[in-house]
Image (cartoon, rainbow, N blue to C red):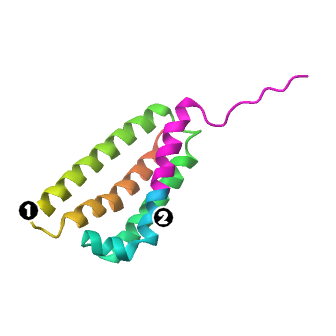
Amino acid sequence: MAEVVTSRVSRRTAGPIADGAFKLLLAAVCIAGAAPLGRLLDTPTWLLIASGAALLTCGGIEIGYVRTRPARTYTRLMIAYDSGWVLAALAGLLMAWQGSGAGGEVWIGYQTGAPLVFAVLLATAAAK
């Protein structure tokens, strides 16, 4: 009897898995490099560690729910998250160009709060 082997990663799950993996990678960078990144971005070390923890949580939840949440839900959440990411980065750059030291805090602050909102919205979304 022939056995059918199916891939665990489909076209619909590849995006959310890659997005979650990127968040996990960014979390590792934030946590491992908290002190030097804090100096570079002029942000407190604790904020980078908190950001890393939030990204770690979100990335794990994002990968964990990939089989039980609709692709449409993931797509909407990723678009909203990434749009906010771009706006926070632009706001941080604008502040830095104007000589403000708060630009890094704006961007890392977004990286701390937005992943938690993303994770809560994903966890409370309707299942497939």
Q: Earlier in the sequence, mark 1 or mark 2?
A: 2
**Which amino acid type is marked by label 1?**
Gln
Residue 119 visible in rendering: yes
**Which amino acid type is marked by label 2?**
Ala
Residue at left 26%, top 60%?
A: 107
Instruction: Using the rendered view, name the quadrant where residue 113 is placed.
Output: bottom left
Numbered mark located on residue 98 in the image = 1
Determine whether 41 is above or below 22 in the image: below
The magenta segment is 1-24
Counting from the top left corner in percent of width and height, residue 23 is at 45, 54
Residue at disc 1, secondary structure:
loop
Residue at left 17%, top 55%?
A: 91
Residue 127 visible in rendering: no
Quadrant holding the C terminus: top right
Q: Residues within 10 Å of mark 1 (few under 14, many from 20)?
A: few
Q: Is residue 49 left or right of residue 100?
A: right
State yes or no: residue 5 in magenta.
yes
Q: Is residue 106 left or right of residue 57?
A: left
Counting from the top left corner in percent of width and height, residue 121 is at 41, 47
Residue at disc 2, secondary structure:
helix
In the picture of the structure, the residue carrying the numbered disc 2 is: 28
